[in-house]
């Protein structure tokens, strides 16, 4: 994570008007939130832009959303490039819509400099859901995220949650550190692999076997899917016997590109079972508390960093430095004094 813009630091009231990166008019946050809750797609998009851009209105947005959040089931999809995450996301959206659920999708690409929907067509076949008021799709990328995607994504999730999404699917690309962070935002994480690419071994190396709640071996229409399932099973067994009552991640084979007989209903069943286990075991709550703790830490650290930025080169620091050189104090006491002014 890098710096944090002054305007979003912890101190000071937010100005009433955002800087308007795209020359927008001032937003009336309560109205936007009311409209988003009624399912108005433009207001949802607008709120996500506000949190993405670390707008000065961010705090007001977060406060206004909070009473309406905590309902959405967050599903993370991760796995190597090209494994079929977007195709699976599209199939899941269709299936959850079929079950009458309101669905949100966040396509997160930590490596991409683009955002705001430009890449959407490539990521999730939006046209499948065009005009469906029960689906919100948004792509997010590193551009503009001074706090990092791991910081921006929970805010966007909160918007979709408040907008009444029953399910939010978060697709991330790759198997790097930021993907792990984003995956950790989910209630249930699906790790996708494909046969014949050594994905399983790569995934084990990257440490994503541990984060999987459900494994999906996609492209099961290709040769080697059964072998990939066997490899995965033996790698999981090598991990040792699960404790009593622990969740044992199931492995589902899919052909996400097919309209029917694609294994997607099985994936949904396993997700539902995991969801029930999360509730019964208390692990669901533990995960959400851990997630909130990380978020608070990230926000507080950003504030501290911004404060430290102000301290650097400040008169107070200069005075303390003079005192250390003059032998009037030592650097430890000087640092304590500096921190005490926080
Ligand atoms: N044969 C076969 N092809 C599939 C299947 N699922 C997806 N594909 C194809 O695989 C390619 C990549 O699919 P995507 O869904 O874009 O994969 P992705 O993991 O989202 O890719 P990135 O977001 O770029 O990492 C596309 O051409 C899909 O049509 C499947 O079950 N079988
Ligand atoms: Mg994709």
Image (cartoon, rainbow, N blue to C red):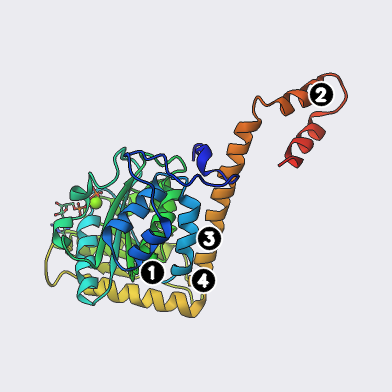
Q: CA distance from mark 1 to mark 2?
A: 54 Å
Q: Are marks 2 and 3 in contact (CB under 8 Å)?
A: no
Q: Is mark 3 within 8 Å of ligand 2?
A: no
Dots 3, 4 in contact, CB < 8 A = no
Which residue is at 27% across, 74% downward? 101
Separation of marks 4 and 1 at Cα, in angstroms: 13 Å
Q: Report the residue marked by disc 3.
A: 292
In-front residue for pair 312/189:
312
Q: Which residue is mark 4?
A: 285
> Does label 2 or label 4 sit earlier along the sequence?
4
The answer to whether 328 appears left or right of 21 in the picture is right
Tell me if residue 266 comes above or below residue 258 in the rendering: below
Closer to viewer: mark 2 or mark 4: 2
Residue at screen point 11% across, 67% down:
259
Does 237 appear above or below 334?
Answer: below
Report the disc number at residue 72: 1
**Callout 1–callout 2 Cβ contact below 8 Å:** no
Q: Is residue 312 above or below residue 260?
A: above
- Per the image, label 1 sits on a secondary structure element best described as loop
Tell me, yes or no, whether the two marked residues, 1 and 3, touch with CB atoms within 8 Å: no
Q: Secondary structure at mark 2?
A: helix
Name the disc covering residue 324, or none. Answer: 2
């Amino acid at each position: 994570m890098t710096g944090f813009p002054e305007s979003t630091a912890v101190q000071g009231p937010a100005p009433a008007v955002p800087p308007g990166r795209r020359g927008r008019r001032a937003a009336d946050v309560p109205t936007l939130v009311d409209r988003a809750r009624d399912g108005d797609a433009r207001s949802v998009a607008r709120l996500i832009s506000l949190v993405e851009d670390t707008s000065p209105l961010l705090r007001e947005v977060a406060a206004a959303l909070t009473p309406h959040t905590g309902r959405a089931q967050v599903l993370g999809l991760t796995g190597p490039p090209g494994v079929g995450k977007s195709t699976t996301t599209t199939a899941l959206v269709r299936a959850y819509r079929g079950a009458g659920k309101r669905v949100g999708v966040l396509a997160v690409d930590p490596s991409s400099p683009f955002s705001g929907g430009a890449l959407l067509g490539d990521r999730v076949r939006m046209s499948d859901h065009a005009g469906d008021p029960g689906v919100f799709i948004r792509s997010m990328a590193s551009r503009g995220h001074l706090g990092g995607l791991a910081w921006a994504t929970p805010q966007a999730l909160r918007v979709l949650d408040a907008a009444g999404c029953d399910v939010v699917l978060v697709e991330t690309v790759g198997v790097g550190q930021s993907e792990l962070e984003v995956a950790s935002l989910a209630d249930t994480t699906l790790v996708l692999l494909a046969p014949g690419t050594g994905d399983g071994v790569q995934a084990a190396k990257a440490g994503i076997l541990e984060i999987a709640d459900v494994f999906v071996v996609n492209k099961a229409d290709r040769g080697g899917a059964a072998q990939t399932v066997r490899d995965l099973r033996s790698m999981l067994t090598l991990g040792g016997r699960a404790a009593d009552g622990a969740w044992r991640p199931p492995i589902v084979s899919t052909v996400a590109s097919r309209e029917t007989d694609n294994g997607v209903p099985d994936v949904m069943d396993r997700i539902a079972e995991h969801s029930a286990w999360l509730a019964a075991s208390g692990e669901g709550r533990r995960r959400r508390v851990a997630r909130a703790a990380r978020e608070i830490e990230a926000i507080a650290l950003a504030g501290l960093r911004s404060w430290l930025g102000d301290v650097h080169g400040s008169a107070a620091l200069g005075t303390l430095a003079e005192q250390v050189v003059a032998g009037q104090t030592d650097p430890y006491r000087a640092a304590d004094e500096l921190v005490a002014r926080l």
